[in-house]
Image (tube, grey):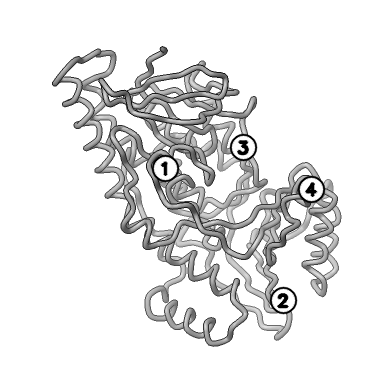
Amino acid sequence: MEEIEILIVGGGICGLATAVALHRKGIKSVVLERSETLRAAGAGIAILTNGWRALDELGVASTLRQTSVSLQRVWDVDLESGKRRQSPVSVGEARCLKRRDLVKVLADDLPSGSIRFGCEIVSINLDSITSFPVLHLSNGSSLTAKVVIGCDGANSVVAEFLELRPQKMFSLSAVRGFTYYPNGHGLAPEFTRMKRGNILSGRTPVDDKLLFWFTLQKSNKKDSAVAKDPELVTQLSLESVTGYPIEWINMIKNCDLNSLSLTHLRYRAPWELLLGRFRRGTVAVAGDAMHVMGPFLGQGGSAAIEDAIVLARCLAPKMKKYVGQKEKGQKMLAMAEEIGQGLDEYVEERRMRLVGLSTQTYLFGSLVDTSYVIVKIFILLIFVVFFSNRIKHTKYDCGPL
């Protein structure tokens, strides 16, 4: 059975960022990705000020800044009342990136051979002698590692091993996509959200010729079938934005079909993040596997990159003592215990930050989700009392790598 120091399950943004962070600390890891190529579902991704701080620590921010425009403000438009409200998008830098650009830049920063494609994990168990995790793959092979980090998203096999509670569902689905304008879209670098009834739609420039857009609508039993056909996804979005300005409708009509995705929105409840156990032995989770949240704050990607920085900072000092060593008996148990302590430090440092983000996204999602006026008023009161500064979450600094 092949033995590896650190295995990272999942080659998305969080998994690659974690591998880069460990690489910067002089720790080698291997990323296991189930698909045959780099995956970047979801078209665009918002990176706010806190996320750029983390990307600066990884050393990839300057390259990514060249791929997108800096957003200046947010416009919220209520189409029924005609009200328009302007607000800052972040306390500093905010951009919308193409997910594939972010994934590619992170992957390119890793040593050759760091990513193994076509590796689907089906189960995990702890070795009865060493207490280290053993990963069983769909092809029948097995791998053992000193550390396993689950960055395998909302349907996480690693989270299942940790016996985390199943994630909950909003009764909302999201369509995301790109629209390309060969002659330029001519829009200011602003994020615009429009609301009509229970439908929320937004758009933001990525660069001078590319717009990222989304629609949020009530989920439907047919969504799983619709998601497989881009034409049907487009039609669903067009039905959602009935009554929107004609340029908005045309934006969706002329979208890049290959960029479309339709997903049912999930979340891990704030109280589960507050009380949950996210480490077992030398196995832990990060990113959506740990704290999947609705897109309402635009913090999912940035929070995952923060995870990577904190995890590498806490784990690297413990790992450097044991890299390449094959301890036995009591020394092996002591090694596992010390590595576990490093993972506990990571979990506890992240816990309250994630509880705060999760609470805000949960409230915002519930506000969009419910049709009861009394519930909406109650949620708005909570926002006024506890989250009056709507962009305070972007001030967060995860610290140095």
> Disc 4 residue type?
Tyr
**Residue 366, position as x, y percentages in the image:** 54, 71
Report the mark closest to the observer, 1 or 3: 1
In the depicted view, which residue is nearer to us: 232 or 388? 232
Task: Quadrant for the C terminus, please.
Answer: top left
Chain-order first, disc 4 or disc 3: 3
CA distance separating discs 4 and 2: 25 Å
CA distance separating discs 2 and 3: 32 Å
Chain-order first, disc 4 or disc 2: 4
What number of labels is visible? 4
> Disc 2 residue type?
Arg
**Tag 3, which secondary structure?**
helix
- The crowd level at tag 2 (other Cα within 10 Å; few <14, some 14-19, many 20+) is some
Chain-order first, disc 1 or disc 3: 3
**Residue 161, position as x, y percentages in the image:** 41, 38
Q: Is residue 289 above or below residue 241?
A: above
Q: Which residue is mark 1?
A: 286
Contact check, label 2 and label 3, Cβ < 8 Å: no
CA distance separating discs 2 and 1: 35 Å
Q: Which residue is mark 4?
A: 180
> Disc 3 residue type?
Asp
In the depicted view, which residue is nearer to us: 279 or 52? 279
**Tag 1, which secondary structure?**
loop
Chain-order first, disc 2 or disc 3: 3
